[in-house]
Structures are given as C-alpha cells and as structure tokens.
Image: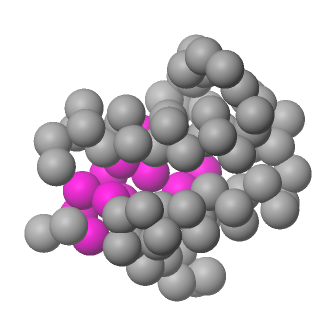
Amino acid sequence: MTRDEIKDAVLDIIRDVAGLDDAPEIDGDKPIREQLDLDSMDFLDIVMELRKRHKIEVPEADYGKLATLDSTIDYIESAAK
C-alpha cells in the first residue's frame, strides 16, 4: 500500500468508529484522540479494525505509536514491509 492508500484506509476506519459521514480534517502531527474527542474504547476499536480489515497486528506495547495520523501511517507502512 502507498502512504496515500494507508491514510485513506485509516481515515475510513476513524470515520466509521467515530460515526462521521465525511472524512475528518485531521492534523497529522496532533493526537487523533484529542482532535476527535475519542475515548479509549474508540481507540481500541480503531486498532481492532486495522487488524480485521487489513490484517495488521498491533501489540499493546505499540499503541502509543498510533497516537497521530502520521505516526499511524508510518507504523503501518513499516509493518507492511
């Protein structure tokens, strides 16, 4: 997957979990949870959807690496190699 494809996939999951109709405007460098007022369960839903939809395993120790949109894209990109 390209970075743009990864970004689109992550935004699709965030939109579904957050119950948003449109793709949210997310600053890539700021924590996703703060920008969209997501709670810890929403975050876990995002992680589970990454695994379910894209077969990406994220160990609990790596959850902090998914804090921002940019760091999430970097993590998925490196996991896919």
- Residue 57, visible in the rendered structure: yes
Q: Depth check: 43 or 75 in front?
A: 43
| Image coordinates for residue 81, horizontal then vertical, percent | 13, 69
User: In the drawing, does residue 51 fall left or right of residue 73?
Assistant: right
| Image coordinates for residue 42, horizontal then vertical, percent | 78, 54
| Image coordinates for residue 13, horizontal then vertical, percent | 55, 45
| Image coordinates for residue 57, horizontal then vertical, percent | 43, 79
User: In the drawing, does residue 30 fall left or right of residue 62?
Assistant: right
Q: Depth check: 27 or 4 in front?
A: 4
For residue 5, what is the image quadrant?
top left
Q: Depth check: 19 or 1 in front?
A: 19
Residue at (84%, 35%) from the top-left corner? 37
Q: Is residue 71 magenta?
A: yes
Q: Depth check: 33 or 13 in front?
A: 13
Residue at (71%, 66%) from the top-left corner? 44
* Number of marks in picture: 0
The magenta stretch is 66-79
Secondary structure, magenta segment, majority class: helix
- Residue 31, visible in the rendered structure: no
